């Protein structure tokens, strides 16, 4: 086992994707002589290496059980595998437990972030370090059953490049969580032109061609399940019932859920901006009609619009709309600002049983 600790004064930045030539599946275009029919005829049997990426944030109560269940499942499947855990700045004993697992088992790889960078960035880091020609994404809380990986591989052997888990039931969640999740997926679907499957999370299998395509996208505000849909390729869903957390508490309170929803919508849709324009035209039209009505009453009748209250209601209403639209513009401008700064997606404090892929490619 090797452990690389980075000097604080020289943090290592997020690595660039490794060349496809070093991996089992190439992202280079197929020769024109190879038809789609010939490609479909290629039979997949067993991946030479399967990489499982597990982001973890304050999961000390469950992480050992996650490791044991994943390892048993993969050994039963008879595949060569590696387990890549990404410690996303945990403040509990998660890192200590993962470091101990890495010392005892060379198949366990650990990436330790310098701070909390967020779930989607942790997933990205794990994907960047994955060496397998097939990559599995799964959370550490065991709400997603590792046993479903066998069914994923069955679909992969049939020629599918992405196999995602589709939730048909969510156990142990409040009605509010279920209702807001349902609302989010349907709102996102209606506002984007990308076919993002509803009722799915990040639990999925990805073939190497999909992984390499995903790593070529370097945007800062990442919505992984949306990006996987955006890159395309042959995809299929597998229905399952999502279990309760084995231990601990949800890492997505309402505030983070709202932030996540905003990232998803603004990453794949301009409709909030278009809505601002539409609302502006409607407000202007209503205002013009109101002006005509007031002038008519003033010039041709003895009635007048009286009252300070009515004036304040109109002023506050229009002012509220303007502030909301400024906020929408601010969300998009903030994302432009983040992209222009071009800071690394994450910084790594230490790696266990792993080398830096950026150094490997020099």
Image: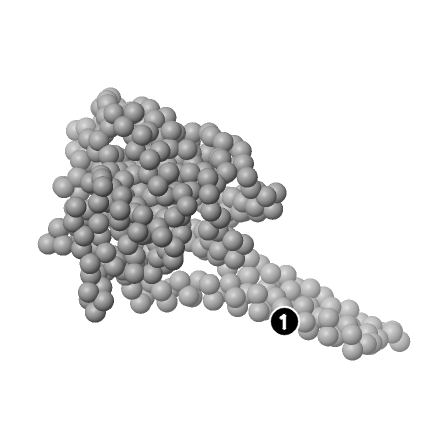
Left or right: 87 in relation to 269: left
Residue drawn at x 48%, y 51% is 252
Q: Quadrant of the C terminus?
A: bottom left
**Residue 117, position in %: x, y?**
36, 58
**Residue 347, position in %: x, y?**
27, 60
**Farthest-out residue, right:** 302
Which element type, helix, strand or loop, lies under badge 1?
A: helix
Q: Residues within 10 Å of mark 1 (few under 14, many from 20)?
A: few
- The residue beneath circle 1 is 319
Would you say residue 26 is visible in this rendering? no
Instruction: Give the image quarter of residue 34.
Output: top left
Q: Nearer the viewer, residue 292 or 11?
A: 11
Q: Nearer the viewer, residue 281 or 128?
A: 128
**Residue 310, position in %: x, y?**
77, 72
Q: What count of labels does the image hold?
A: 1
Q: Is residue 294 above or below residue 264?
A: below
**Farthest-out residue, left:** 362
Would you say residue 20 is visible in this rendering? yes
Residue drawn at x 38%, y 55% is 92
Instruction: Give the image quarter of residue 143.
Output: top left
Give the colouring mode of the picture.
one colour
Residue drawn at x 19%, y 48% is 354
Q: Is residue 291 above or below residue 205?
A: below
Residue drawn at x 28%, y 54% is 112
């Amino acid at each position: 086992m090797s452990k690389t600790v980075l000097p604080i004064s020289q943090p290592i930045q997020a690595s660039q994707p490794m060349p496809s030539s070093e991996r089992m599946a190439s992202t280079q275009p197929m020769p024109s002589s190879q038809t789609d029919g010939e490609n479909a005829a290629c039979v997949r049997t067993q991946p030479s290496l399967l990489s499982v990426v597990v982001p973890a944030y304050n999961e000390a109560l469950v992480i050992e059980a996650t490791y044991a269940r994943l390892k048993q499942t993969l050994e039963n499947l008879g595949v060569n595998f590696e387990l890549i855990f990404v410690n996303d700045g945990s403040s509990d004993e998660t890192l200590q437990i993962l470091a101990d697992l890495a010392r005892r088992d060379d198949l366990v790889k650990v990436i330790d972030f310098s701070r909390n960078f967020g779930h989607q960035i942790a997933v990205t880091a794990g994907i960047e370090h994955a060496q397998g020609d097939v990559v599995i994404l799964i959370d550490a809380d065991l709400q997603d059953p590792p046993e479903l990986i066998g069914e994923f591989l069955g679909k992969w052997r049939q020629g599918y490049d992405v196999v995602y888990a589709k939730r048909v039931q969510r156990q142990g969640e409040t009605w509010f969580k279920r209702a807001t999740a349902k609302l989010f997926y349907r709102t996102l679907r209606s506002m984007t032109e990308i076919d993002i499957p509803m009722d799915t999370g990040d639990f999925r299998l990805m073939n190497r061609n999909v992984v390499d395509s995903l790593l070529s996208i370097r945007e800062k505000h990442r919505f992984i399940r949306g990006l996987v849909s955006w890159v395309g390729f042959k995809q299929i869903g597998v229905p399952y019932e999502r279990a309760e957390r084995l231990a601990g508490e949800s890492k997505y309170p309402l505030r983070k859920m709202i932030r996540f929803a905003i990232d998803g919508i603004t990453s794949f849709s301009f409709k909030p901006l278009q809505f601002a324009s539409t609302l502006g035209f409607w407000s202007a039209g209503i205002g013009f009609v109101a002006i005509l009505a007031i002038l008519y009453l003033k010039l041709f009748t003895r009635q007048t619009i009286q009252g300070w209250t009515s004036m304040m209601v109109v002023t506050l209403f229009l002012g509220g709309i303007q502030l909301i639209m400024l906020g929408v513009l601010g969300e998009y401008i903030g994302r432009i600002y983040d992209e222009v700064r071009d800071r690394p997606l994450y910084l790594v404090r230490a790696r266990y049983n792993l080398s830096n892929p950026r150094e490997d490619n020099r």
